[in-house]
Each structure stands twice: as structure tokens, then as C-alpha cells.
Amino acid sequence: MITNETYTDIQILQNHDFEVGITFDALDIKSTDSFAAVIALDKEHTEFQGPKWGGSAWSQAAVYVVPLTIIADQSADTVTISLPAIATRFFTDTFEGVWDLVQKDTSGAADVYTRQVQGDVVVSAGATRLSDTFTASVA
């Protein structure tokens, strides 16, 4: 669990589904709110080799940011960010970067942007590939 307006690092394991639930302690998510979350090499959005969504499949490509999937639950004041294993496999073994989650509130006369969470990203290399043979569980 991560509380709002905090600095927290995340670790992404290659070939592993990444998902983090963020619970806000004093935030009332409104129907006019929206969120964006990305992983980048740095704040300048310097190009790096990473996962890229091509409309129907993930691949490794030169990218500036990797957008995270976001599910906001207004009733629970939670936001879940995720990236599937099929995407995490395309981070390089030594990737280190930054991430943040920004909220956009359009309920007033002017849009208000709030960076709710930020931190560093470290990728841990995975030895097992998604294409390896998986053995069924034995009871």
C-alpha cells in the first residue's frame, strides 16, 4: 500500500506481472478526475530500449516513456497501476529509471494537476523466459 504524495521506489521483475495498489488516505477521487502514470529513464524523457505497445502486441523498441495501465476505484479511493509480464520482459536487465502518478482534476475553472506518487524504478533480470516449458503443479 502506498499513501498519497509520497516518494516510493518500485521494483519490476522481468517476465512477471507488475501490479501495485495505491490507497489514498485523504483524497476523494471524483468522477471528473483522471490519472496518468509512466516509467521513464529520466525527467527529460531520454530515449531507451524498453516495452512498446504496438496496438496488438508488445515489443522491444526505442521509447521515451512506458505508460502504465491504470484502474481508479472512486468508491475505495484507490488506484492500481500495472504492466503485464509480456511487457516487463522487454525492459533491459540493467534498467533504472523514474516513475510517477499524476492526477488531473477538471472540476474547477482551470485544470489542476497533482503528482500524487513518484519514485525510482529498478528492473530485476529474469532467468526464466515466458517461452520456457512450464510444468503443471503436482499434488
Image: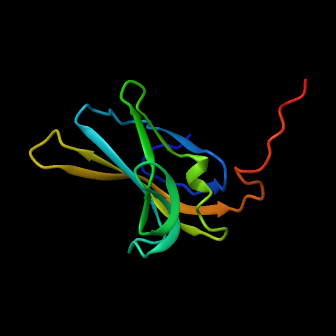
**Residue 134 in the image: above or below residue 123:** above
Residue 78 image position (x, y, % from top left): 44, 34
Extreme residue in the left direction: 109
Write the residue at 56% across / 62% down.
121
Q: Position of residue 65 (x, y in %)?
A: 42, 64
Image quarter (top left, top right, bottom left or bottom right) of the N terminus:
top right
Give the residue displayed 78% in from the left and 59% down from the top.
Answer: 127
- Residue closest to the eye, 128 or 43: 128
Q: Residue at x 42, y 55 (%)?
A: 54
Q: Residue 129 at x, y = what percent?
A: 73, 54
Quadrant the C terminus occupies: top right
Position of 43 with respect to 60 (left or right) is left
Q: Decide which of 25, 10 is in the foreground and name it.
A: 10
Height in image: 56 above or below 51?
A: above
Residue at 38% x, 75% y: name it.
44
Left-right relation of 65 to 122: left
In this figure, which colouring scheme has been used for the structure?
rainbow
Q: Left of 18 or right of it: where is 131? A: right
Count of numbered circles in the view: 0
